[in-house]
Image (tube, rainbow, N blue to C red):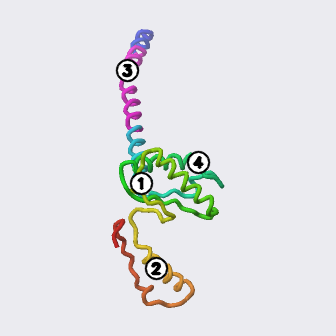
Amino acid sequence: MKTSIVITITFFCCAFMVGCAPNEQKSQNQVLIDSELVNALNDTAIQNAIVSQHTLYPYHFMENGTELNELGRHDFAVLTKYFVEHPGSLNIRRGDVPADLYEARVNMIVEHWKKAGIKMERVHISDGMPGGPGMPSEKVVKILANFDKSATGESSAAGAGASVTTYPAGKK
């Protein structure tokens, strides 16, 4: 009798495990779908940030060279895709590289974009600050000046009660 109980319990355990296998597979498929959805949303958010910033930094380039590194090629591809259809500005930050290397980097970008079909008269390239929401640079300079005065002990009526107002990009 004990053998039949063991066989019965074993049978039900096996049947239960087999019955759960399709649910486990469905669960794994759902996890994969959810993971890909998160990756797609992250990719879109990253691309939007790259376009909003529209800036290439010295760290996007190979050290002391005009070639883009892996990160630079990725960000440049996102910007190229955007500027094929939209006008705008691209900031290429010079950093501390010599003027001739900076000029060579700009020329390399322009040549790639011409090959991609981007009309360069629709794009302004400069050594400007990154885009996105923020405040006018004049206000930042005033705030920093007041901050420096307060750090050195000088009093400033304007700095003591200064409030910070942010503006949408492009508006003052």
Q: Identify residue type, mark 4.
A: Asn
Q: Identify residue type, mark 3.
A: Phe
Q: Quadrant of residue 107?
A: bottom right
Q: Identify residue type, mark 2.
A: Ile
The label number, if any, that marks residue 51 in the structure image: 1
Identify the residue position indicated by label 3 in the image: 16
For disc 3, the neighbor class at 10 Å (few under 14, some 14 to 19, many from 20) is few
x and y percentages locating residue 131 in the rendered image:
43, 62
The answer to whether residue 30 is magenta is yes
Query: Would you place residue 29 above or below residue 134 in this image?
Result: above
Return the residue nearer the eye: 5 or 106: 106
Return the residue nearer the eye: 31 or 86: 86
Identify the residue position indicated by label 2 in the image: 143
Q: Quadrant of the N terminus?
A: top left
Q: CA distance from mark 2 to mark 4?
A: 36 Å
Q: CA distance from mark 3 to mark 4?
A: 54 Å
Of the numbered discs 4 and 1, the one sitting upstream in the chain is: 1
Q: Which residues are magenta?
A: 9-35
Identify the residue position indicated by label 4 in the image: 69
Q: CA distance from mark 3 to mark 1?
A: 53 Å
